Amino acid sequence: MGELQGPRSLEDAKKWMLDRLQRRVHPLGLTDVECTRAVINELEGLDGETWARAWSKEGERFFALATDLEARGETGKARDNYYQAYGFFFLARFPSPTHPDKLAAYQRELDAYAAYGRLCTPSLTVHRLPLEGEGEVTFYFRQPATGGPFPAVVMWGGVDAWKEEMTALSEAFLAEGIATIALDNVGTGQSPIKADRSGERQFLPVLDWVEANSDCRDGALAILGRSFGGHWATKLAHQFPGRFRGAVNWGGGVHHMFQRDWIEKSRFPDTYLMDLVETRSRMLGATNDEEYALGFEQLSLLDQGLLDGPCAPMLLVNGRNDTQCPPADIDILLDHGDPKAVRLFPGGHMGFGPHTVPTIVRWVKKQLLFWDQAETDHV
């Protein structure tokens, strides 16, 4: 797989999006295919104003339709149309709200998702916890309709896929009898902090909340970080090896990703649409390339001396030809500390394909239920 030498042209971006739309791959896997194709074909530019306006127009159309359907009592159709509105507003702020119009689209994304959340099944509840002296952490909690207390998985996304984009993964876990807690990655979405060497502190009050929740089974907790979020899942798995039955790093960096040579090499990866550096910089709070490089350098888990200690059972998942996060970071994890499970899929970042999510869900389910089954067999 090759690498771009600079930003995409509009026509190249359209080809990239149409390919992803056909395969229903992030970020083109949420919205109605024909409506999305129409927006792509008519798109006049990639600048923040033009981009946000094109996608938000479709989001507002679906939101108005959903509002009318809800007023008429057609809650199922209203829910589905609120979700479509959310999906188009997500595209309007994608990859991150670095422009005022994208920031406005992000607020509309939250509005539409809240309306969807009121109507979805199983129910979705919003919770907020204080992060001492730094604001509050917002997360979504969902649990299967009956049969609790449930094993639980706490999960978060990367630099551009946030807690709302964990919906499909959440529903896959719910179908297996597993409760889900979704929050934003550090420095993204509604996260109260920027990503730094101790960014994992954001997750700790949420983990405490899950462990104290009577709807969640005691001692049956897993964590999952998607894309950049896999970095924090790996760090937590090493900091608290006895706390989790399983931890998934789905495409996250460990050491090589944070080195200056890779930072430059991955500036315009073929698997990313646009503004990757700007999006990562926003996560870090960096205002220039040097701050960006320095912010990344401090995140190396190898340099922090964590990788030779024990860790929770881990699954490492990625694409074999990732140009955003080097597959060599998986080798580092295999060469240090406790043994890990690995699954590499064809293709680029995160190894998107029909078997990726099912593989992850099966592994997490096995980890969460293994001890329960072992105890039953023993009895």
Image: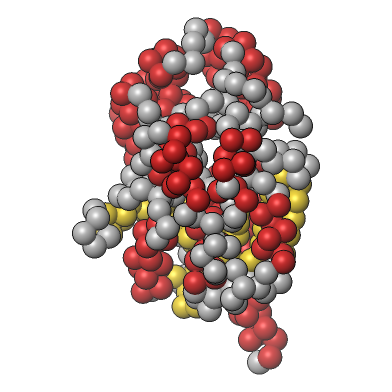
Q: In the rendering, at what x and y percent does residue 275 appear?
A: 50, 27
In this rendering, does residue 278 appear at all?
A: yes
Total residue callouts = 0
Which residue is at 36% across, 59% downward?
202
Q: Is residue 353 left or right of residue 310?
A: right
- Residue at image location 54% in from the left, 75% down from the top: 241
Q: Image quadrant of residue 162?
A: top left
Q: Quadrant of the N terminus?
A: top right
Q: In this rendered view, identify the residue nearer to me: 20 or 324.
A: 324
Residue 82 seen: no
Q: Nearer the viewer, residue 378 or 299?
A: 299
| Camera-nearest residue between 156 and 65 | 156
Question: Which quarter of the figure is the C terminus placed in?
Answer: bottom right
**Which residue does the image show at 38% across and 15% down from the upper left?**
49
Q: In the rendered view, would you say 55 is above or below 90?
A: above
Coloring basis for residues = secondary structure
Q: Judge left or right: residue 165 versus residue 109.
A: right
Give me the residue at 69% from left, 28% from top: 3
| Rendered location of residue 118, percent (x, y) | 35, 43
Q: Is residue 144 above or below residue 92?
A: below
From the viewer's perspective, tell me whether residue 17 is left or right of residue 46.
right
